[in-house]
């Protein structure tokens, strides 16, 4: 290296998702400082440490016992912005990721087709929202992640029974999204991965096993056996999608990311029987599947690290593909 690389500070709450990124950054020669976010103390007059910052705080952090991560991260990102720090997926991107409703608004603003989407707080308002949707619908947490909490209903009676049961989970803030259910032409959703204004690849994720579709290899591991390699049947869950960078929908995603301040994203859509593609989720804390890396030769976190390297003004030591 011709010059000293800056320290990369990583805001995180789930250590299981870190190794692919930290290994890729270390291969580029970056010094790394890990910054766990749950409890903390912030002095707004204090200068942040010099370097580049990466925000890896997930909207599902509360499901891992980190109930304060999202709120604290909002303040930290505002502090970093005030001090003009370079943050990948900073405050604007974070606020968008924390709200499914704001995602729907942004997608519509950029001319991207979405399912009919409503937000409701309180059981009676949830029932009222469901009455405005024709046909089957799903519920999800406005602040969600990994597909947790998604429920499919064929009728309002089924929803009412769920709301009155002990199984009802209102999520971290009581805001419930109701969304038109789109019957897929094939039993999968498609996820488009974008880094630094570039298309990486697209992947299909099978939905016949449920809606928890986090592609991270760590998400494929049984909780009781964290040292076991991901199950081989993950290969049947994820597969490469035949989508290229010049696809009109991909181009719309790239414009959205550029204008909304999102630098790293996995954006998901469903293709209906009539061929229409409905986009419904923007993942800023995106992860990558080792299965897809083997299939496509494109390593997501290596591409991420190469993007960080380009910002630091260094020559990449290793290609992502």
Image (cartoon, rainbow, N blue to C red):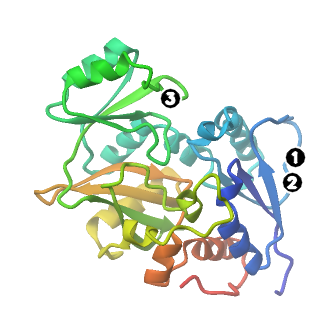
Give the residue at x 82% y 74%.
Answer: 5
Identify the image quadrant of the N terminus.
bottom right
What residue is rendered at 41% in x and 55% in y?
A: 256
Towards the viewer: 157 or 197: 157
Of labels 1 and 3, earlier in sequence is 1
In this rendering, which labeled residue sits more in front, label 1 or label 3?
3
Which secondary structure, mark 1? loop
* Residue occupying image coordinates x 67% and y 59%: 226
Q: Which mark is residue 111?
A: none
| Residue drawn where x is 82% and y is 69% of the image | 6
**In the picture provided, is 225 more to the left or to the right than 169?**
right
Residue marked by disc 1: 47
Residue 285's spot in the image, x, y percent? 56, 54
**Frontmost residue, 220 versus 12:** 220
Q: Is residue 5 above or below residue 174?
A: below
Q: Secondary structure at mark 2?
A: loop
Instruction: Compare residues 221 and 102 and report the one nearer the observer.
Output: 221
Observer able to see residue 184: yes
Packing grade of label 3 (10 A; few <14, some 14-19, many >=20) is some
Query: In the orientation shown, which residue stands out farthest toward the right?
Result: 46
Q: Nearer the viewer, mark 3 or mark 2?
A: 3
Q: Is residue 235 left or right of residue 76?
A: left
Give how far across and how far down residue 251 sits, in percent.
34, 66
What percent of the width, then of the height, locates residue 86? 71, 57
Q: Find disc 2 in the rendering and name its residue.
A: 49
Q: Which residue is mark 3?
A: 171
Q: CA distance from mark 3 to mark 2?
A: 34 Å
């Amino acid at each position: 290296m011709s010059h000293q690389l800056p320290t990369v500070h990583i805001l995180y709450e789930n250590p299981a998702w870190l190794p692919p990124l930290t290994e890729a950054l270390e291969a580029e020669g970056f010094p790394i400082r890990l910054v766990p976010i749950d409890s903390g103390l912030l002095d707004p007059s204090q200068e942040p440490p010099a370097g580049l910052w990466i925000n890896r705080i997930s909207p599902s952090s509360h499901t891992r016992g980190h109930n304060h991560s999202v709120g604290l991260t909002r303040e930290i990102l505002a502090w970093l912005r005030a001090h003009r720090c370079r943050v990948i997926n900073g405050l604007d991107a974070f606020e968008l990721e924390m709200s499914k409703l704001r995602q729907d608004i942004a997608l519509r603003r950029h001319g991207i087709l979405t399912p009919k989407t409503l937000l409701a707080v309180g059981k009676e308002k949830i029932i009222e929202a469901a009455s405005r949707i024709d046909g089957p619908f799903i519920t999800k947490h406005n602040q969600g992640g990994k597909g947790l909490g998604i429920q499919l209903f064929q009728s309002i009676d089924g929803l009412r029974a769920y709301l009155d049961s002990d199984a009802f989970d209102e999520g971290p803030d009581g805001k419930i999204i109701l969304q038109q259910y789109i019957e897929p032409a094939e039993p999968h959703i498609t996820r488009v991965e974008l880094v630094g204004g570039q298309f990486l690849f697209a992947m299909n994720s099978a939905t016949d096993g449920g809606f928890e579709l986090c592609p991270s290899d760590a998400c494929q591991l049984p909780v009781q056996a964290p040292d076991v390699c991901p199950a081989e049947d993950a290969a049947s869950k994820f597969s490469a999608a035949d989508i290229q960078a010049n696809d009109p929908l991909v181009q719309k995603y790239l414009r959205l990311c550029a204008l909304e301040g999102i630098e790293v994203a996995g954006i998901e859509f469903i293709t209906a029987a009539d061929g229409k593609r409905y986009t419904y989720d923007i993942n800023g804390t995106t992860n990558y599947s080792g299965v897809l890396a083997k299939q496509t030769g494109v390593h997501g976190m290596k591409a991420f690290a190469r993007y960080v390297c380009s910002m630091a003004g260094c020559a990449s030591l290793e290609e992502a593909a």
